[in-house]
Image: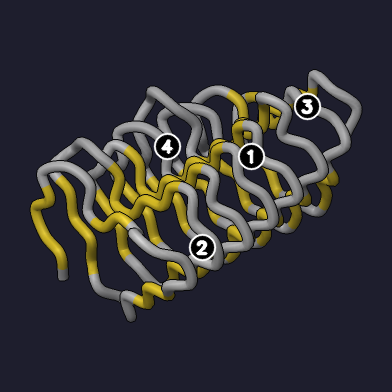
Amino acid sequence: DLLNCPGDGLIFGANSIELDCQGHKINGTSSGSGVSATGKLNIIVKNCVIQSFGTGIYFSNTNSSQMINNTIKNTFASGIHVASSTNNTLKNNSILFGGSSEPAIVLYSASKNIIESNLVLNNGAWGFLIYGSSNNNTVKSNIISNNTGRGMVVSDSSNLIFNNFFNNSVNAWDNANN
């Protein structure tokens, strides 16, 4: 386990790296990101328990990468934040008991990503936010439940959204053509 990280937990410094935590924890002290990649290709983050960071997993300008089977909880901002990135897969992740400042999953200027079979539960803000020229993403088979505010907010067009389960006070808001 990697415990009591005062800032970022792990930062990827090269392309084509796989992090398989095998159920081990990456624990923070309320700031930074549990796992972070900027300007990378072919990064895999899987089987991690990430908790008590500002953001659980943060990808910026990171392409053709995967976040699979992670549990992210007790973040103070977003669980997973993907910015200016393409062709990534977010699958079978659980984002639980997140903070109130950002949605559990954020796509900003991120296109051609697949967000599938994730559990987004009991977060203090929205479940999903897709905005800032985030187009041609596929969001399917997710469970988005008991989040404060909206379950999903989509501000960009040409995203394929289907077979998701919602149970929030306001389930979805689409301000585009999806």
The tag on residue 67 is: 2
Q: Which residue is drawn at 66% across and 54% down?
A: 115
Quick one: label 4 or label 1, which is nearer the N terminus? 4
Residue 54 in the image: state x and y as whole percent. 29, 36
Q: Which of 87 and 171 lies nearest the eye of the viewer?
A: 87
Above or below, 103 against 91 in this view is above
Residue 155 in the image: state x and y as whole percent. 74, 23
Q: Which of 100 and 86 lies nearest the eye of the viewer?
A: 86
Residue 74 in the image: state x and y as whole percent. 29, 44
**Drawn side of residue 160 relative to residue 75, left or right:** right
Q: Mark 4 points at which residue?
A: 78
Quick one: label 2 or label 1, which is nearer the N terminus? 2
Q: Name the residue under label 1.
A: 167
The tag on residue 156 is: 3
Task: State the quadrant of the N terminus.
Answer: bottom left
The tag on residue 150 is: none
Q: What residue type is labelled 3?
A: Asp
How dense is the environment of label 2, judged by Cα within 10 Å: few (below 14), some, or many (20 and up)?
many
The CA span between labels 2 and 1 is: 24 Å
How dense is the environment of label 1, judged by Cα within 10 Å: few (below 14), some, or many (20 and up)?
some
Q: What residue type is labelled 1?
A: Asn
